[in-house]
Amino acid sequence: MNPEDRARQDIDRQLGQCGWVVQDKGQMNISAALGVAVREFPMLTGEVAYLLYVSGKAIGVLEAKPKGHPLIGVETQASKYSGALPPAVPAYKSPLPFTYESTGAFTQFTNLLEPDARSREVFAFHRPEELLRLVSLDAQVRGKPKALPALDSSKLWSVQKRAIENLEQSLFTRCSDRSCRWGMITRRNS
C-alpha cells in the first residue's frame, strides 16, 4: 500500500467518526446520509480526492496528500477544485464554500465565505451539521467584528475606551471559528 492510500484510510476513518458516509463515485448515493464524502470525484480541472455533500448538495472539497507532504500550497489546489464543479452537480454556492487539505495526520480548513479566507489547522473535520450551519449564516465569524457599532465613549473614562478598543482590535485580528463565538457576544454602551 502506497503512502497516499494509507493517508486516505486514515481520512476515511476520521470522516466516519465525524458523521460522514464515505463512498466511491461508482456507488455514490448522495441521499444515503446527511453528509456524504465521495472519493475521486471528477471536477472540471481534474479529480478531487473527496467531494463533500450535505443534504444532497455539494458543499466542499477535500484534497488528500500522503503523510509528511507539506500542506502549504495544497490550499491553492483545493481552491481551484472548489470553483470547478461540473454544472449539473447541485451545490449550495459556487465556488464551493469549504475546502480541506489533509494527510490524515494534519488537516487544514478554509472557509471561503470569510472576508479574509485563509487555511488554518483543525483537529477534526467539521460535522455535516456544522457546515450546513456555516453556509446558512448571514455573516461569517471573521466578518462580524467589522459589523460592530461605533463605540459611544461619551460615558467612558479614557482608560475604559482604550481597553475596549484594544480588546476589539485583539478579537478582530485573532478571532477564529474555534476561539470565539461572535453570535453570542454583543457590546453594550452604557
Image (cartoon, grey):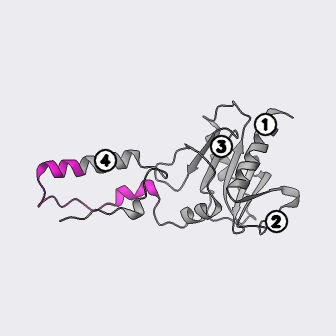
- Type of the residue with mark 4: Gln
Is residue 68 visible to the viewer in this orientation of the structure? yes
Name the residue rendered at 19%, 48% in the picture.
162
Name the residue rendered at 59%, 57% in the picture.
97
Look at the numbered disc 2 and give the secondary structure of its residue.
Answer: loop
74 left or right, relative to 22: left
CA–CA distance in space, label 3 to label 4: 30 Å
CA–CA distance in space, label 3 to label 1: 13 Å
Look at the numbered disc 1 and give the secondary structure of its residue.
Answer: helix
Look at the numbered disc 4 and give the secondary structure of its residue.
Answer: helix
Which residue, given by chain and number where applicable, does mark 1 sit on? 4
- Point out residue 68 in the picture as x, y percentages from the top left corner: 69, 30
- Point out residue 133 in the picture as x, y percentages from the top left corner: 56, 65
Q: How crowded is mark 2: few (under 14 residues within 10 Å), some or many (20 or more)?
A: some
Which stretch is magenta?
A: 140-164
Look at the numbered disc 3 and give the secondary structure of its residue.
Answer: strand
Which residue, given by chain and number where applicable, does mark 4 sit on? 169
186 left or right, relative to 95: left
What number is the disc on residue 101? Answer: 3
**Earlier residue among tags 2 and 4:** 2
**Earlier residue among tags 3 and 2:** 2
